Structure formats: C-alpha cells, structure tokens
C-alpha cells in the first residue's frame, strides 16, 4: 500500500523521523524505494543534476510530469511528491490549481510541493481545497535564486527568522500537510518543528527537523565537483562509474570486448547457405 499524507503526519506524532529523497527516473526510484524512503520527491532539482543547468528555473511542468510518471510507475510504497516548477503556480491560484491537477492526474503523484511563504498561503489553500495535498517549501527557495543572490542560508537575522516562523504557521493554517525547510539555521528549524503540528522536513536545516530530504545524486556523488556543506557523501560513485566505463572503452578499442560469450550464433546450415549466396553475388 502506498504511503499517504495521514501516515506521514502520524510519523511526527509518533516521533518517527521521516526519510525523503529525490528521484527522477526508474533507477533512482527503484533504489529509493528499496532503501526504505517514506517520501520520494520528483524535485525540480532535476534541472541541475539531470539536465545540467545552473539552477532550477528552466524546468517545465511537462518535464516534471514526464519524470513523475516514471517514478510513480516504478514504485509501490513511498508517497510521491511532484514539484511545481517555476511560474507554474505564481501567476494566480487558478493557474496553480490547474497545473497541480495536471501534475496529479497525468503522473499519479500523491501530493505536490511549491515554494514560498505567507504570500503563497492563498494559493496553497486553493489547491488543498480542490483535494490535492500540498507540501510547502521555505528558507532557501531555489526558484527565487536571483532574489536570494545565491544558494545562501536564510533566516539568520532576527526579523528574517521571525518571518520564517510566521510563514510556516501561515502554510500550516492554509492546509499544507508538511513543509520543506531548506538552508536555515538549525535553531530556527528546531523552533518551527516544535511549534508546528505538521512534519518539517529539513535540508541544511540541522538535526532537529521531523525528517530530512536530500538529492539522490548528492548522496551518491554521481556528478563531479565540490560537495555541498549540507549533504554527506554516503558513497562516491562517480569515480567508480567512470573507471568502469573507461575499462569498457579500452576493451572495445583493444578488441577484447565483445567476445563469443556476448554473441549469438546462426545454425551452421543457414550460415553455409548465406556464404554460398555471398560468394555467388561476388562473382
Ligand atoms: O527540487 C528539489 O530537489 C527540492 C529539494 C532540494 C527539497 O526541492
């Protein structure tokens, strides 16, 4: 049975921490489920780790639907959350509802996620009222990267920390079933997690949230480059995978792969007949 939002919320009441991870394709979805993730996020981070952009802004609703449908199809148990990409919900609550409905109907996700604070509360309420569970996203909201001026910790000043707490409250009142808190001081995240009834899922928000979300590619080091401070490399697969493919390239160049073992064979009589035809046509 697939996880639902009531079970996710129950986890908070039972003080069971909630592991969440991104997935975008069949391989990452299968691994995330087999590893026991409670929630899989088809995040717009795919714009960076899958499409190779510097930020998430180019990602479209059609692309999220495409990836989310794969992740839903390849999994049975985790709750699948589809990310609402840039400008798919900010124009108006009506447009947001329309896109959230498309995402749910065309991919089969059990909930959607959107970024933004108090000003997004009416939009969250409108989507929730049409029967679509919404996860909020506060702190560093990557779709506003040009406003934030970079991937920086948010809520360090007293007034900003207070505004974050108020925004989380407003999203809960609007009906969000959970909130992602990205890159905020651990103390602020702990206060919000204590204050709110709904689960707070951190990323770069310290150890006292109700759960944690991380990007699949970061945990496994699938891409080269510096690690983010907020992540941990649970495996370093990029060099291992590159080495394996290097060995393949050399084997092809040296003529030692493929061999008889990887080949299919014709029955001898068909081969002989072909050889005869071949010889005749060459005369
Ligand atoms: O798109 C994403 O992967 C996210 C997580 C980083 C929370 O929004």
Image (spheres, helix red, strand yellow):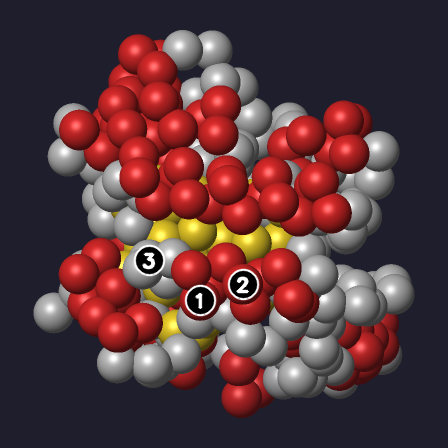
Q: Distance between the residues labelled 1 and 2?
A: 5 Å
Residue sitting nearer the eye, 1 or 179 = 179
| Residue 282 visible in rendering | no
Q: For residue 191, which numbered disc appears in the image?
A: 2
Q: For residue 109, which numbered disc appears in the image?
A: none
Q: How crowded is mark 2: few (under 14 residues within 10 Å), some or many (20 or more)?
A: some
Q: What x and y, as percent, mark residue 80?
A: 32, 55
Q: Where does label 3 land, which residue? A: 198
**Circles 2 and 3: CB distance less than 8 Å?**
no
- In the displayed structure, does residue 58 sit left or right of residue 36? right
Q: What element carries label 2?
A: helix
Q: Is residue 244 above or below residue 82?
A: below
Q: Is mark 1 on a helix, strand or loop?
A: helix
| Residue 65 visible in rendering | yes
**Which residue of the protein is positioned furthest toward the bottom in this rendering?**
261
Q: How crowded is mark 1: few (under 14 residues within 10 Å), some or many (20 or more)?
A: some
Q: Distance between the residues labelled 3 and 1?
A: 10 Å
Q: What x and y, as percent, mark residue 277?
A: 47, 55
Q: What x and y, as percent, mark residue 29?
A: 40, 64
User: Picture quarter containing residue 223?
Assistant: bottom right
Foreground mark, 3 or 1, reads 1
Foreground mark, 2 or 3, reads 2
Q: For residue 194, which numbered disc appears in the image?
A: 1
Q: Distance between the residues labelled 2 and 3?
A: 13 Å
Name the residue at 47% across, 11% down.
Answer: 91
Q: In this view, does 7 lie above or below 43?
A: below
Q: Which mark is first along the chain, 3 or 2?
A: 2
């Amino acid at each position: 049975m697939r996880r639902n939002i009531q079970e996710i919320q129950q986890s908070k009441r039972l003080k069971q921490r909630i592991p969440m991870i991104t997935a975008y394709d069949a391989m990452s979805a299968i691994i995330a489920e087999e590893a026991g993730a409670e929630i899989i996020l088809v995040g717009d981070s795919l714009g960076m780790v899958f499409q190779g952009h510097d930020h998430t802004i180019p990602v479209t609703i059609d692309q999220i639907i495409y990836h989310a449908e794969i992740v839903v199809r390849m999994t049975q148990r985790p709750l699948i959350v589809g990310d609402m990409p840039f400008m798919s919900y900010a124009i108006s609550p009506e447009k947001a509802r329309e896109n959230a409905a498309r995402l749910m109907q065309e991919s089969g996700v059990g909930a959607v996620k959107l970024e933004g604070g108090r000003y997004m509360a009416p939009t969250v309420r409108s989507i929730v009222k049409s029967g679509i569970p919404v996860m909020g996203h506060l702190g560093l909201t990557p779709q506003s990267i040009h406003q934030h001026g970079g991937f920086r910790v948010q809520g360090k000043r007293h007034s900003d920390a207070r505004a974050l707490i108020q925004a989380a409250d407003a999203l809960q009142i609007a009906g969000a079933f959970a909130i992602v808190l990205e890159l905020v001081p651990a103390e602020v995240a702990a206060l919000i997690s204590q204050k709110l009834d709904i689960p707070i899922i951190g990323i770069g928000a310290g150890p006292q949230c109700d759960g944690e979300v991380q990007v699949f590619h970061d945990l496994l080091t699938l891409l080269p480059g510096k690690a983010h401070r907020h992540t941990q490399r649970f495996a370093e697969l990029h060099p291992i995978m590159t080495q394996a493919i290097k060995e393949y390239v050399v084997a092809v160049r040296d003529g030692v792969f493929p061999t008889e073992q990887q080949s299919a064979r014709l029955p001898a009589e068909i081969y002989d007949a072909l050889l005869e035809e071949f010889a005749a046509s060459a005369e």
